Amino acid sequence: MNTFFYNDTQFLIEKCDDSWNLSRVLSDGSFAAVGAGLFKGLLLDEAQLRSQELVKAIYPVGIKVIGPDVAHPGRVGDLRIIGPNVSHPNFIYWNKDSSSLVR
Amino acid sequence: MEIKSSVFLVTGGTSGIGETVARYFAAQGARVAVVGRRQEAIDRVVSSIKQTGGEVIGIQGNVTSEADTAKFVRATVAAFGQLNVAVCAAGIISDGTMLTLDKETGKVSRKLSYDKWQNVIDGDLTGTFLTLRDAAEAMVNGHWEGLLVPISSVNKIGQIGQLNYSSAKAAVALMPKIIVGEFMLRGIKNIRCVGVAPGYTATPMLTGMNQEALQAILADVHLGRLIDANEIAALIGHCVVNSALNATTIEITGGLCNAGGIAK
């Protein structure tokens, strides 16, 4: 049984026959499944590297704001208010999209 | 395309048709990425596939979020190195007639709310679009053979009380023709698109309903029973291996008829 941290979250990687099971350790000590039967035939170091790539893809962190969105200014009288381009796929709605957050 | 060497992405993979599809292909040796909104359900499906020796990842995500669809496609490729089949089984129902009248006055007492309309359009139509778009992007850029499977419904022909759902499913049923036409236009040869439009299926929602109402539904089904989600999975499996199937939406209903035996 081996663990690694990503974004202050602990992940557990366990060998099962010739493949690996990966889980996320929750704050109460229980586990959430990330994957099973992964990375067949790989040794621990390689499997751990692949696991880190995988958790980075599943649990992206940080806010990437693309903008300003000059095509859609908000108008108050003659004033044009330009905000970020929230239609870009990398924009994460932190207040609504809780599934994008690790915890 | 072979099932065993393929990588499947299944949205709505933690319940109903999607869960069955995920289990079905994992049992056949495919590698499967299961997308669902609740982690407990993901844990259950991943654990169950793990018991049978399958290769699976579970990703918490919402198909109506562009950030999430990009995320679960990226995660699938990170885990398995490719993506071959995207099954868009995520969907919701929120029924109601457009107008409800007050029995006493005959005037409109209630309208189908904007939220009730938009939630179903977001989940069933926009979610399918985003998933197919991002999956197709990965397949084109990765040069992998691919199949896109939007899940429509037999209610695409128009079901009373489902203006939102039927509108979404009618639009989804059109997607294969448009998408494959655009692939022709752009010279994309490695991806097919085949929609599946199930009839009344034995999911907990239907099997748990009032049994008299269920019998009334089955009276119009030539087969005399609900179709099994495994039968839908088998149809998708046939679409995977038979490359002549393309640019169409296939109904699987057990022979659903209008009263009097006229096929719907």
Image (tube, rainbow, N blue to C red):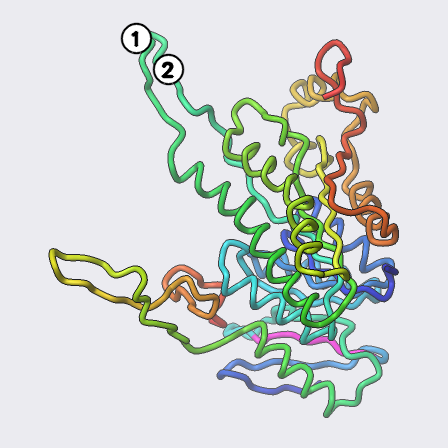
Question: Please, which chain is the residue tagged with disc 1 on?
Answer: B
The residue lying at 75 percent from left, 49 percent from top is: B20
**Between residues B212 and B20, which one lies in front from this camera angle?**
B20
The residue lying at 82 percent from left, 63 percent from top is: B30
Q: How crowded is mark 1: few (under 14 residues within 10 Å), some or many (20 or more)?
A: few
The residue lying at 81 percent from left, 53 percent from top is: B24
Left or right side of B54 for B13: left
Q: Which residue lies furthest to the bottom in this view?
A: A45
Q: Name the residue under label 2.
A: B101
Task: Say whether mark 1 and mark 2 are on the same chain.
Answer: yes
Q: Is residue B237 magenta?
A: no
Of the residues shown, which amino acid type is indicated by label 1?
Thr
User: Looking at the picture, how far across and down is residue B94, in whole percent?
Assistant: 50, 35
Q: Is mark 1 on a helix, strand or loop?
A: loop
- Residue B113 — which label? none
Left or right side of A72 for B118: right
Q: Specify start and end residues of the magenta stretch as a single range.
A: A19-25
Q: Mark 1 points at which residue?
A: B105
Of the residues shown, which amino acid type is indicated by label 2?
Leu
User: Looking at the picture, how far across and down is residue B104, in whole percent?
Assistant: 32, 7
- Magenta region, main secondary structure: strand
The residue lying at 71 percent from left, 61 percent from top is: B187
Q: Does the magenta stretch include residue A22?
A: yes
